[in-house]
Image: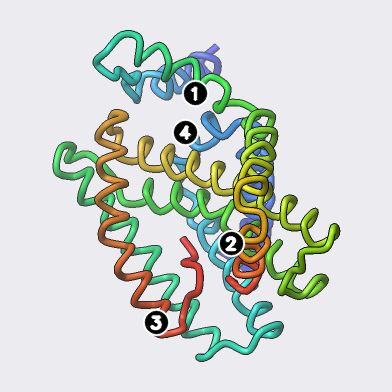
């Protein structure tokens, strides 16, 4: 495989990732179902690269307590542990599952998180907090809350679908496994918060 | 001909690779299907108005607390 072939391979994967980002807005169910059958690992690297760019930019805007690469590595550990957690949950009832399906669906379900954190970064630079109780401040607060709630709802939909398509669980089992995951992840997030590594967990 | 047969087989496998959800109680399954129908395609048509209503409700109930919460979220990244 020569350099030209690799370059066009990455470019094609980038195009697919961007196209799927749009389709996750328009048709999340069908798109995530297709993503669960994905095999092209370049797409995974591209999404993780977007996250890397976010951590790098945020470190330029706000000085983090530790180097941004360390925070990014923590995010990668979180991400892979999440995939392994759900993989083993799925393996309890279905031995045919593949870990790559979890990696792809969970990576694509990071899209609302990436959008929210980038938006937050932009608003932090344009309209630095704290917000006031003036008409402008209140209007912005309503707008930002609306944006945050819709992105959170989108995230929940994508996360649920990611787990459902990867594990092939039914509704109840999917919800139970997500609750179990939250029970494990919540104390860990609080721990990271007290270490000043993550204010809001990047999941 | 072989190509279209392949596409058809792939599509069928894709559709039947996952069992449809059954919540055990018929009205509950119906409600689930009706709700998810709106979220499968163009979910933002439902999510944005619902979020706006929720944000306005939160604003009318909590007022200053919501403004403070937004400030806190803005420091959140």
Element at label 4:
helix
Which chain contains the residue that carries disc 4? Answer: A
Q: Give the residue pinned by disc 1.
A: B36
Residue A32: horizontal and vertical position, in percent?
Answer: 50, 37
Element at label 3:
helix
Which chain contains the residue that carries disc 1? Answer: B
| Vertical relation: A66 (above or below) A157 | below
Q: Give the residue pinned by disc 3.
A: A194
Q: Give the residue pinned by disc 4.
A: A33
Give the residue at x 59% y 51%.
A112
Q: How is the image coloured?
A: rainbow
Give the residue at x 85% y 57%.
A135
Element at label 2:
helix
On whether disc 3 and disc 1 are found on a single subunit, the reply is no
Which tag, 4 or 3, sits closer to the chain's start? 4
**Alpha carbon distance from label 4 to label 3:** 37 Å
Give the residue at x 58% y 22%.
B38
Q: Nearer the viewer, residue A199 or A55?
A: A199
Direction from residue A29 to residue A77 in the image, left or right: left
On whether disc 4 and disc 1 are found on a single subunit, the reply is no
Element at label 1:
helix
**Alpha carbon distance from label 2 to label 4:** 20 Å
Residue A191: horizontal and vertical position, in percent?
Answer: 34, 77
Which tag, 2 or 4, sits closer to the chain's start? 4
Q: Nearer the viewer, residue B72 or B3?
A: B72
Residue B71: horizontal and vertical position, in percent?
Answer: 66, 69
Q: Give the residue pinned by disc 2.
A: A46
Neighbour class for label 2 at 10 Å: few (<14), some, many (≥20)? some
Are the two marked residues, 4 and 3, in contact with CB atoms closer than 8 angstroms? Answer: no
Q: Residue A49 — which label?
A: none
Which chain contains the residue that carries disc 2? Answer: A
Are the two marked residues, 2 and 4, in contact with CB atoms closer than 8 angstroms? Answer: no
């Amino acid at each position: 495989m020569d350099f030209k072939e690799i370059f066009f391979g990455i470019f094609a994967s980038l195009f697919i990732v961007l196209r799927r980002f749009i389709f996750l807005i328009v048709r999340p169910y069908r798109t995530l179902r297709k993503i669960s059958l994905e095999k092209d690992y370049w797409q995974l690297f591209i999404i993780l690269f977007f996250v890397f760019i976010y951590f790098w930019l945020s470190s330029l805007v706000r000085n983090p307590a530790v180097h941004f690469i360390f925070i990014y590595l923590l995010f990668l550990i979180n991400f892979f542990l999440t995939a392994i957690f759900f993989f083993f949950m799925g393996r309890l009832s279905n031995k045919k599952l593949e870990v790559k399906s979890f990696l792809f669906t969970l990576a694509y379900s990071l899209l609302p998180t990436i959008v929210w954190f980038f938006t937050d970064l932009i608003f932090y630079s344009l309209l630095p907090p704290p917000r006031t109780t003036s008409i402008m401040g209140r209007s912005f607060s309503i707008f930002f809350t609306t944006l945050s709630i819709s992105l959170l709802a989108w995230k929940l939909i994508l996360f649920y679908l990611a787990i459902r398509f990867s594990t092939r669980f039914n509704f109840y089992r999917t919800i139970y496994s997500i609750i179990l995951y939250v029970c494990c992840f919540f104390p860990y997030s609080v721990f990271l918060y007290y270490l000043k590594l993550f204010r809001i967990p990047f999941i | 001909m072989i190509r279209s047969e392949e596409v058809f087989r792939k599509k069928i496998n894709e559709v039947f690779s996952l069992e449809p959800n059954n919540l055990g109680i018929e009205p509950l399954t119906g409600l689930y299907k009706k709700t998810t129908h709106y979220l499968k395609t163009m979910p933002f048509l439902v999510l944005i108005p619902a979020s706006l209503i929720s944000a306005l409700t939160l604003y009318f109930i909590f007022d200053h607390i919501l403004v403070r919460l937004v400030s806190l979220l803005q420091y959140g990244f």
